[in-house]
Amino acid sequence: MDIDLVKLMASKSDEEVEDYLTNLQKYTPYAVYAAIDELKNAGRILQKMK
């Protein structure tokens, strides 16, 4: 079963999407990239992590 991550992220709140960035170990890299793209599309400013 393939999940459309773009649609999944679009259906989530900002806080739910941010969870993908604060808990990286819980998610696949593709899900994390989809979360980053969703936050960018929503106009959220992202800073590089050190």
Image: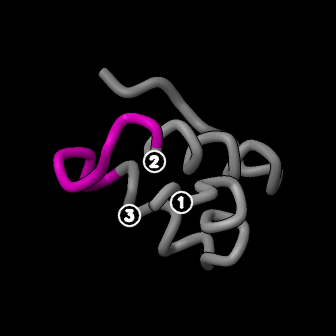
Query: Which residue corresponds to the image point at 74% horizontal and 43% vertical from the top-left?
Result: 40
At label 1, counting other C-alpha atoms closer than 10 Å, the crowd grade (few under 14, some 14-19, many 20 or more) is few
Could you tell me how far apart the alpha carbons at marks 2 and 1 are, in whole angstroms? 10 Å
Q: Main secondary structure of the magenta part?
A: helix
Amino acid at the residue labelled 3: Asp
Q: What range is drawn magenta here?
A: 22-30
The percent coordinates of residue 25 (x first, y second) are 17, 46
**Number of the front mark, 3 or 2:** 2
Identify the residue under disc 3. Answer: 19
Name which of mark 2 and mark 1 comes first in the sequence.
Answer: 1
Identify the mark at residue 31; answer none if there is no mark: 2
Disc 1 is placed on an element classified as loop
Name which of mark 3 and mark 1 comes first in the sequence.
Answer: 1
Query: Which residue corresponds to the image point at 26% horizontal and 46% vertical from the top-left?
Result: 24
Is disc 3 in contact with disc 1, using a CB cutoff of under 8 Å?
A: no
The percent coordinates of residue 47 (x first, y second) are 54, 31
Amino acid at the residue labelled 1: Ile
> In the drawing, does residue 5 fall left or right of residue 30?
right
Name which of mark 3 and mark 2 comes first in the sequence.
Answer: 3
Identify the mark at residue 3; answer none if there is no mark: 1
Amino acid at the residue labelled 2: Ala
Q: Is residue 25 magenta?
A: yes
Could you tell me how far apart the alpha carbons at marks 3 and 1 are, in whole angstroms? 18 Å
Could you tell me how far apart the alpha carbons at marks 3 and 2 are, in whole angstroms? 11 Å
In the rendered image, which quarter contains the C terminus?
Answer: top left
Q: Is residue 2 magenta?
A: no
> In the drawing, does residue 50 fall left or right of residue 19?
left
At label 2, counting other C-alpha atoms closer than 10 Å, the crowd grade (few under 14, some 14-19, many 20 or more) is many
Disc 2 is placed on an element classified as helix
Query: Which residue corresponds to the image point at 62% horizontal and 63% vertical from the top-left?
Result: 9
